[in-house]
Amino acid sequence: MRWGAAAALLSLILWLAGPQKLLRTLAGVDPLYFLVALLFSIASNLVSAVRWAHLARMLGLQAPTRQMIVFYARGITANSVLPGATLSGDMLRSYQLHRMGNSLLRSGISVLFDRVSGLWVLTLMSLLAAMFVWGGGETLGGPVWHKSVAVASVLAVGILLPFTLGFARWWSWLPIKKLVSVIDNCVEAMHALLGSRAAMIRLLALSVGVQVLSITALWLCGFAAGLQVPFVTMAMLAAPIFIMAAVPAGLGGWGTRELAAILLFGALGYSADMAATTGILYGLCGLAQAILAVPLMMKRFNSEVDK
């Protein structure tokens, strides 16, 4: 089913972008811009690993930063070769952290919170960027305006949703007791995180750094493809593109990311082939890092645990 979905997405992307136009755009990619984008993408993942290590220690887990960088790099490789988009790498990260003597549930919660903190800051930044663009007098046509309001509304709901966990135990009606228990543990961990203001400020600062680096990498991929858009516009569209890349419908984010780029940039009047190439180049940044991290996948976990 996953291969079928990936093939369907690829066919749709080729139809929207045009095979010949897409090939010409790919052939004309600026290698210098792409190389710089790759460096920013690597920096983003390094800061992400540092953020995860900091968050795990906030939860009372044993999480040396150097080792967490290795675990994170393995997660990138797993995301590229296993089904499930980011879920595959996240499961591997949880397991590796657990093998260091930490609780499996708390290890999983640290990975979940690492994802949520990043997505929360990303959606907030995209919403603020959208408000800045619209406040600056950007004129949008009727259909585009309605789509923009819809996307902004979804982003706003995503920003507010995590805070509903503190209002009441609304999830207690769920029929699966184990799931209710897991959510209870997540809420308890969230309260523990909120107890340290200085640590939370550092966590948010790291998340902002991750997203600024990621958006810059996507922006540079756009320039490499000939899609020259203002940085604030790229920041406005980054959240939907990155979130779609995390949807486990294609393979390793491929397909969903490019389709989101075509639809979002197309709504603003940009070329579909350049938008698709931008998504492809950003995916290649992740693939290059996955290949670089392959040697780390070969090391035995036992030797690391013994250390």
Image (spheres, helix red, strand yellow):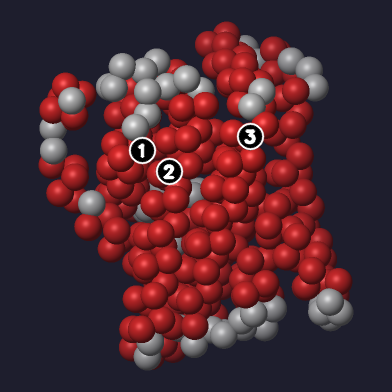
Q: Secondary structure at mark 2?
A: helix
Give yes or no for contact between labels 1 and 2 (Cβ–Cβ under 8 Å): yes
The percent position of residue 121, horizontal first and vertical second, equals 64, 49
Give yes or no for contact between labels 3 and 1 (Cβ–Cβ under 8 Å): no
Question: Circle 1 is placed at which residue position?
Answer: 65
Question: Circle 2 is placed at which residue position?
Answer: 50
Q: Residue shown at 37%/29% (left/top)? A: 63
Give yes or no for contact between labels 2 and 3 (Cβ–Cβ under 8 Å): no
Above/below status of 274 relative to 130: below
Left or right of 295, for residue 178: right
Q: How far separated are the C-alphas under marks 2 and 3?
A: 16 Å
Q: Residues within 10 Å of mark 1 (few under 14, many from 20)?
A: some
Q: Nearer the viewer, mark 2 or mark 3?
A: 3
Q: Secondary structure at mark 1?
A: helix
Question: Circle 3 is placed at which residue position?
Answer: 198
Q: Amino acid at mark 1?
A: Thr
